[in-house]
Amino acid sequence: MLKLLTIHDKTEWNFYVKNSAEYDFYHTWHYHSLDTSGSPILVVYIENENYIAFPLIKRQIPGTVYCDLTCVYGYTGPISNKRMEQLEDPLMENFKVAFLDFLKAENCVSVFSRLNIFFKQSLLLERFGGIYDNGLSVVLDLSISIEAQRKKYRQSTIDAIKRSWKMGFRLIEERGDDAIALFFDAYKENMERIGASDYYLFNEEYFKKITNTDEYDARVFIVYDGDKVMASTIVMLTNGIIEAHLLGTRTEYMRFSPFKFLVDEITVIGRSLGMRYYNLGGGIGYKQDSLFFGKLGLSDLTMDYKSWRFIANPEIYQQLLDDKGIDKNLDVDFFPLYRYNPTLTVLSEGKEN
């Protein structure tokens, strides 16, 4: 049986998330309730006592009777009451049949979803095809001691952290609207400095809402030089995973690399809270750029980041490309291609708009 939940079905949505063997904050009802790009849905396939649930965003394709499915900002993919590697073949095959029927009934042309690096969701979705290797994400393993972790640091990284200690920089966890305001100032300055697209420019009210929930543990950390804010981050702690969701560094403090001090301090706090991993993400667009190599200075552990890019209706997909005069062989990393706008700059982790 396939069940379709909408954002109005909060209790049921939370039931399937909370009873999953593994999930991240990206899957929660609250996080999806903040999305404004379309209509959040949770597609649930139920078979006996087992289920597979897939959170997505449904969007109408302008000027047509068709829609497509995408995901929230972040790393979702399917979840289940069993770990992905424990799902039996018949259950996965039956899910595939039911999901394909759902896509046809809903006139869905394509599906895009970033996959969570910690869950083996490809084992399920590779049955459809369309698994795409985006790059690598840098992760800190908090199961090892802080001493062992620091031995893995690049020399320039440990030098920057020791300088931070010597200069008396402090990492403080803060709460409430004042903390959000301090974070937002650093975040906005950071985004303007790197020329980020509107896709990343969340407003202050959004940050107030994203941290105001009991569905996951959201924390604001601020690095201070005396009483001056150097950098700030919002991290989410869920089921042993710390996600470095968003970060901002004040331009005047870039030379001190407060990010390195911030990460080191958060790993200490994470261990005290029983966290297993701290995901730092990759480079811009998951390229192996200076941002990526900077993160590698903190950890030599990387995990594959994949996305699912599935064309459910090839005929209509091609028609949409033809209508916009887009060559299907266009050499651009973007999906679905019929939504590609070359006039927009998108620094996307998964190349979807």
Image (cartoon, helix red, strand yellow):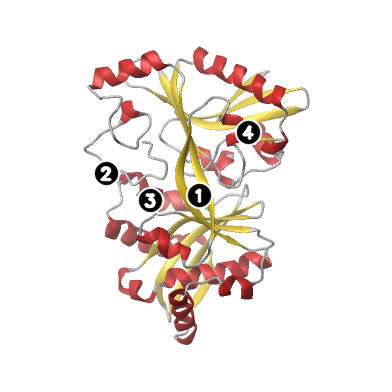
Q: Position of residue 133 (x, y in %)?
A: 47, 40
Mark 3 or 1, nearer chain start: 1
Q: Is residue 255 visible?
A: yes
Q: Position of residue 119 (x, y in %)?
A: 62, 43
As measured in the structure, the alpha-carbon distance from the residue carrying label 2 to the one carrying label 4 is 34 Å
At x 60%, y 47%, the residue is 118
Q: Secondary structure at mark 1?
A: helix
Residue 13's disc number: 4
Residue designated by label 1: 210
At x 32%, y 26%, the residue is 338
Camera-nearest residue between 157 and 203 = 157
For the N terminus, give its image quadrant: top right
At x 53%, y 64%, the residue is 299
Residue 105's disc number: none
Camera-nearest residue between 285 and 245 = 285
As measured in the structure, the alpha-carbon distance from the residue carrying label 1 to the one carrying label 4 is 17 Å
Amino acid under disc 1: Ile
- Camera-nearest label, 3 or 2: 3
- Camera-nearest label, 3 or 1: 3
Q: Secondary structure at mark 2?
A: loop
Left or right: 197 as drawn, with respect to 53: left
Mark 2 or 4, nearer chain start: 4
The relative height of residue 349 versus residue 248 in the rendered view (above or below) is above
As measured in the structure, the alpha-carbon distance from the residue carrying label 3 to the one carrying label 4 is 34 Å
Residue designated by label 2: 345
The relative height of residue 264 versus residue 243 in the rendered view (above or below) is below
Amino acid under disc 3: Lys
Q: Position of residue 90 (x, y in %)?
A: 71, 22
Amino acid under disc 4: Trp
Residue designated by label 3: 287
Mark 3 or 2, nearer chain start: 3
